[in-house]
Image (cartoon, rainbow, N blue to C red):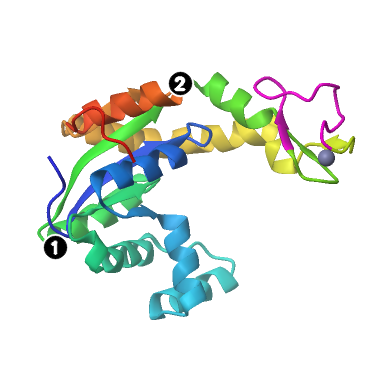
Amino acid sequence: MALQRHDEVVLLLGAPGAGKGTQARYLATVLGVPHVASGDLLRENRQRGTDLGRAAEAYMDRGELVPDDLVVDMIARRLDAPDAVRGALLDGFPRTLGQFSALEDRLVERGGRVRNAIYVEVPTKVLVERLAGRWMCRTCHTTYHEEFNPPSSEGVCDVCSGELFQRPDDRRDVVANRVNVYLRDTLPVVKRFEQRGLLRRIDGNRPIQVVRAALHQALGLSEGVRA
Ligand SMILES: [Zn+2]
């Protein structure tokens, strides 16, 4: 059950720390469609100096958010590319109900649709633990995790004996806020897809291979496909 035409998309949703990026790249390979993340699209369009990239930059220069319609324009253009003939996997978009509506309107205009949406679900407490426990060496930039990959001696790099520090983004309160903002904005999107019978929930609090198998099943793909 592969995707069809340029206008069918599969959405992968999940909070920061849910491991969504890794799974998204894998799934895109399995489906034979491009992996499209809105942040990457924005960066690419700015770097290439496209009309859409320049328009986005004008908003950013004024300190304003890039409007949802403009991001959706970038997605629509990406869907026109030859490698998207079988559709695309959208990673982390839409994040809000506003983005959801903008995306859906555009797809409908093109005779397309969201084929299904997958929500990688991980308990909030686990998300915060995963994201907040990261430490980095000041000297050689090796990364550690308090729980999953601790250094042999607290605060000291195993590789070079350098001092370990925590980036401001990885502080517990900052991380908890990031996760909460995501859930506040995006759970309504998840509910909307659920009401339409398009949502599959995947328990992301399991080993990566088990999550992959669940993704296969959710998309009706045969087991044993290897990227
Ligand atoms: Zn080091």
* Residue 37 image point, x, y percent: 41, 53
Res 223 → quadrant: top left
- Give, as a single range, the part of the protein colored magenta: 143-159
Within 10 Å of disc 2 (Cα), the crowding (few <14, some 14-19, many 20+) is few
Which mark is nearer the camera, 2 or 1?
2
Residue 144 included in the magenta stretch of the image:
yes
Residue 4 included in the magenta stretch of the image:
no
Quadrant location of the C terminus in the rendered image: top left
Ligand 1, seen in the image, is in the quarter at top right
Q: Residue at x 21, y 33 (%)?
A: 219
* Residue 201 image point, x, y percent: 30, 25
Quadrant location of the N terminus in the rendered image: top left
The residue at which mark 1 appears reads as 109
Q: Is residue 39 left or right of residue 210?
A: right
Q: Is mark 2 within 8 Å of ligand 1?
A: no
| Foreground pick, 151 / 134 | 151
* Residue 80 image point, x, y percent: 23, 68
Q: Secondary structure at mark 2?
A: loop
Name the amino acid, label 2.
Answer: Pro
Label annotation for residue 207: 2
| Foreground pick, 177 / 144 | 144
Q: Is residue 217 left or right of residue 161?
A: left
Placement of 110 over or under 10, stated as above or below: below
